[in-house]
Amino acid sequence: MTSLASQDRLPLSQIWPESLVERYRGAGHWRGETFPAFLRERARDFCDQIAVVADTGRYTYAELDKEAERIGAGLLAQGLTPGDRVIVQFGNVLEFIPLVCGLFYAGLIPVYALPAHRITEVTHFARKAEASAYIAGQSYGGFDYRTLARDLVAAVPQVAQVVIAGDASEFTPLSSLQGDVASLPQDFDPQAVAFLQLSGGSTGLSKLIPRTHDDYIYSFRASNALCGITQDSVYMTALPAAHNFPMSSPGWLGALYAGGRVVLSPSVEPGAAFALIEQERVTCVGLVPPLALLWADAAADTPYDISSLRVMQVGGAKLVPEAAKRLMKGLNVVGCQLQQVFGMAEGLVNYTRLEDNDELILNTQGCPISADDEIRIVDDHGQLVAEGEAGNLQVQGPYTIRGYHNDEAANANSFTSDGYYCTGDIVKRTAEGYLVVQGRANDHINRAGEKISAEEIEDHLLGHPSVFDAAVVSIPDDYLGERSCAFIIARGDKPRAVELKKWMREQGLADFKVPDQIVFAEAFDTTAVGKVSRRELRAQLRQRFLDDAAAEPSK
Ligand code: OOB
């Protein structure tokens, strides 16, 4: 197996114009902090306090630091060198946090795969990031990640190291890593890229998002202030810990930054999560809308004491005002506040403020973290819309990226010539400067916060021998917000929908990308002038589906 020499790899960078760098430093947003430095500082200041709790154990800040040193030094002893990219794929388990801290200590670059990702996605991340290693838990949610590791090293030989937590089989056990702590690098550049996050993947496969120490630390430090996170806070990570929302808005990193406590919940099921809330006196949790509603309903007659919960954050997908009302009512009973969060792994995060009136909390998705988040709302020609009108949201700011890693085509599409990120979201701005999300400009499905690119799924479907053409659209869904529906024109005999779904699963794709519904069509409409655009076609099919559903007397 061969590892790429670092000089042969595409360097990681994220560069803001000098005038903005000065502004962000001058305003105190960027303070030259780095992950290793702040984590070590907390280990000193809060040494005996509990930092992380999970179902298999807990770490004090001092223990977390020691474990991170062991893992970081151990990985360097295995032959990795600072700057190497390492794919990590874990559920909400105890090992995840010391591992990520260990990667930071060693100057290694985590690439955060989600537990739902499968070989197709992980191979793509490994290639794009030019990853040298893959680290995962042996199994999670009934899936064995060692099989994925085997397929990955076969597909991408550059992934020369595989480390597994638990029974490692032929791979290196995470628990066996040992190295010389003195080998850990001492100097870190706060403007260097610290890790790669994944985009929601609005077109094609997920893109890699380089985030720097300075920009990311600012985002959760400032979030802490807006979300009331202090040393006394207990933050529960119920959504996958590798996702940007529970990681940094303010997330488990915010909680560690404040010297608070992180509780990893392996389950989103209210019973199991409530038991943990009672046991650890959890004060804050971030959820997607369907889960939030489920939890609020369950809270009404739970035998558990969840009165410690002060703030429930809801984001990742739109919380419609009616649902927000229901939620707020349910939460009031247990003395918990609702906070809407509208964010993106590329940067910009908006929050309703804890002191906001109910009107704003129910009807808006909040306003940006920073006074230096520059928001533009433009029409399809890039012209600013009138105040209060809906348009495309563009942003630049002290924690919003200026470009994806290793993806020129995406950069050409997603950034304006003056460096603003085109979010793909359609929003309105209220007189108070709060944003109200109206929808998406492009074809992607937001399935309870999990983003699915229509294009990516169509590409896969077209690989099936019985699929002549496919168009994937989002359909409103009472529980998920949106579900995916694939319209298929069969080639020859129609395959059965269940078989097609099974086949999709066998392609090694995240399960949430398998279409929820499959509808066979005889033909897709084309106009007199030729083939309609995919976008137009998806819009037509979606509309026809909704009209048919509305016309059905039983619905
Ligand atoms: C979060 O991050 P991503 O990168 O998985 O997805 C970002 C996209 C946004 O562009 C928007 O389309 C959608 O997810 N979104 C929302 C929303 N929050 C995110 N749409 C409507 N209402 C909301 N409240 O999802 C994310 C990252 C950090 C914090 C929170 C969410």
Image: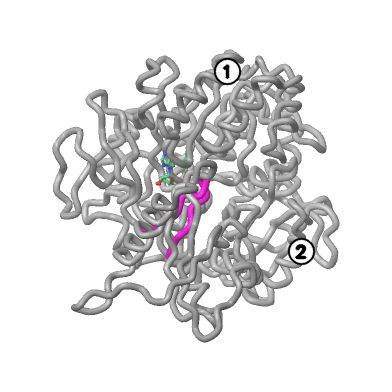
Which residue occupies 26% across, 38% down?
Answer: 375
Image coordinates of residue 269 in percent, x first then y, are 69, 36
Q: Residue 336: which quarter of the image?
A: top right
Q: Is mark 2 within 8 Å of ligand 1?
A: no
Quadrant the N terminus occupies: bottom right
Q: Secondary structure at mark 1?
A: loop
Which residue occupies 40% across, 29% down?
Answer: 321
Measured along the vertical axis of the image, is residue 361 above or below residue 458? above
Q: Residue 66: which quarter of the image?
A: top right
The answer to whether residue 534 of the structure is visible from this angle is yes
Image coordinates of residue 123 in percent, x first then y, are 59, 69
Image coordinates of residue 229 in percent, x first then y, are 54, 22
Residue with the most extreme front position: 553
Identify the residue position indicated by label 1 in the image.
310
Residue 469's disc number: none
Would you call the spot at circle 2 few (<14 residues within 10 Å), some (14-19), or many (20 or more)?
Answer: many
Q: Is residue 528 magenta?
A: no
Image coordinates of residue 129 in percent, x first then y, are 52, 64
Measured along the vertical axis of the image, is residue 31 above or below residue 338? below
The answer to whether residue 192 of the structure is visible from this angle is no
Which residue occupies 16% across, 55% down?
Answer: 381
- The answer for how far apart the CA atoms under marks 2 and 1 are is 39 Å
Measured along the vertical axis of the image, is residue 400 above or below residue 11? above
For the record, the magenta segment spans 443-454
The type of residue carrying mark 1 is: Arg
Identify the residue position indicated by label 2 in the image.
146
In this view, the mark in front (2 or 1): 1
The type of residue carrying mark 2 is: Arg
Q: Secondary structure at mark 2?
A: helix
